[in-house]
Image (cartoon, helix red, strand yellow):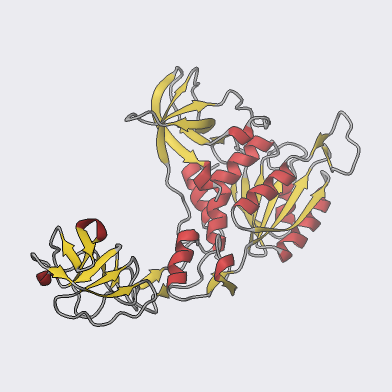
Amino acid sequence: MLNFDEAQAVFAMCAEPVRETETVWLGLATGRVLARDLAAVIDTPAADRSAMDGYAVRAEDCRDACLPLQQVVYAGTRPEPLLPGHAIRIYTGGVIPPRADAVVVQEDAEESYRGVVCARPPVAGQHIRRKGEDARRGDLLLPAGTLLRSGHIAALASQGLTEVPVCRLVEVAILTSGDEVAAHDEPRDVYQVHDVNGPMIESLVQSMGAVVRCHRHVPDDERALHDMLRELAADADLVLVAGGASVGQRDLVAAALASAGGELLCRGVNMKPGKPVTVGRLRGKPVVCLPGNPAAAYATFALLVTPLLRRLQGRSELFPPVGRVRAALAGARAQCGDAFWRVGEVDHPGGRESFAQVSAQQGAASVSALGHASGFVRVGPQSAGQLQNVPLPYYDLHRWLS
């Protein structure tokens, strides 16, 4: 059994990124992973432009002088060369006229029929956005592996790009197992439970920008598991199995994986919840067996599977930052491994450290309040007693599930 940090590294590195790429329209590229480095193809801005509404002038002409107005330049208007001793009315984004070297903002000027008087003489370069100030042609704009967000789309659009090369979407197969799990179109007796893991895992996969290729269910039968694992590994980049990960008589996934020709890379992680989680490979594809209890499956997906998914997607950042918050953990008991406690919204009192309220429901099968969790605090092995207002590592789900 591995400790949490060891297991996280094993999960993250057990597969290679998908190699196939495609080109998509820029407007649909948000959430996709950039397939190759992109350099700026033009200077932005392409010319010196005004950063303010005002008057384009030569700074040396503005001392105690009334400057006749020569032209009005809007964004998109071609300016005339500035005549000596004149001013050109210019609006934000307008191209700086040749021979002008400053912009006087309109609040610092007084305009009359005679011309413009500058209340505050400018200095050369004032309120001018220089050519190439934002990006210069040939400079690296975005590196391969960037998860594209709206701000990246803006940068690419400023270069005149309409399409962008991205990595192919990662395809995931989901397999739920267990005689106790009733499919949604079947009657449920008291000895059965609804399939919680299937829809939850589908949602988690989609939140990561991957797609669910198929969703299957098999009973507690090793041969059925064996056959289904071989089928799914042939068609998907990643197979996620829910249930059957422990060491009970009906926990058959490890045996089925071995009989199908796969290899186990990690069986069990010294963490709570999620201790039974297992990862292996079959036909070169990673196979992850999540615990059957939904809250444990949720935690292990967020903390162990998401770095693996990011690697498959070709992202450059596999592990989001881990913050620190204070939390009051009453009655924390001695333990062998790391415990991950669900917490609600994190408070940010003015000028003070962040504080997390620990959720009352921490059971591995408790899901009623799962949607209210903002993240996990990590509690390492410790002596029995209480941890009151102690700073702890904080895994923010807004970061870890995206």
| 157 versus 174 height, above or below | below
Image coordinates of residue 199 in percent, x first then y, are 73, 45
Near-viewer residue (226 or 208): 208
Q: Residue 277, position in %: x, y?
A: 62, 43
The residue shown at (49%, 51%) is: 9
Residue 399 appears in view: yes
Q: In this view, does 150 lie to the left or right of 241?
A: left
Q: Tell me what residue is drawn at x 45 percent, y 60 percent.
A: 151
Taking the view exactly as shown, the residue that stands out farthest to the front is 113
State which quadrant residue 114 falls in. bottom left
Quarter of the image for residue 129 reads bottom left
Residue 130 in percent (x, y) is at 26, 71
Q: How many labels does the image show?
A: 0
Q: Is residue 268 visible?
A: no
Relative image position of residue 39 (x, y in whole percent):
39, 75
Depth check, front residue: 291 or 147:
147
Q: Between residues 396 and 47, which one lies in front from this camera angle?
A: 47
Q: Compared with residue 105, is residue 201 higher up or lower down, i.e. above or below? A: above
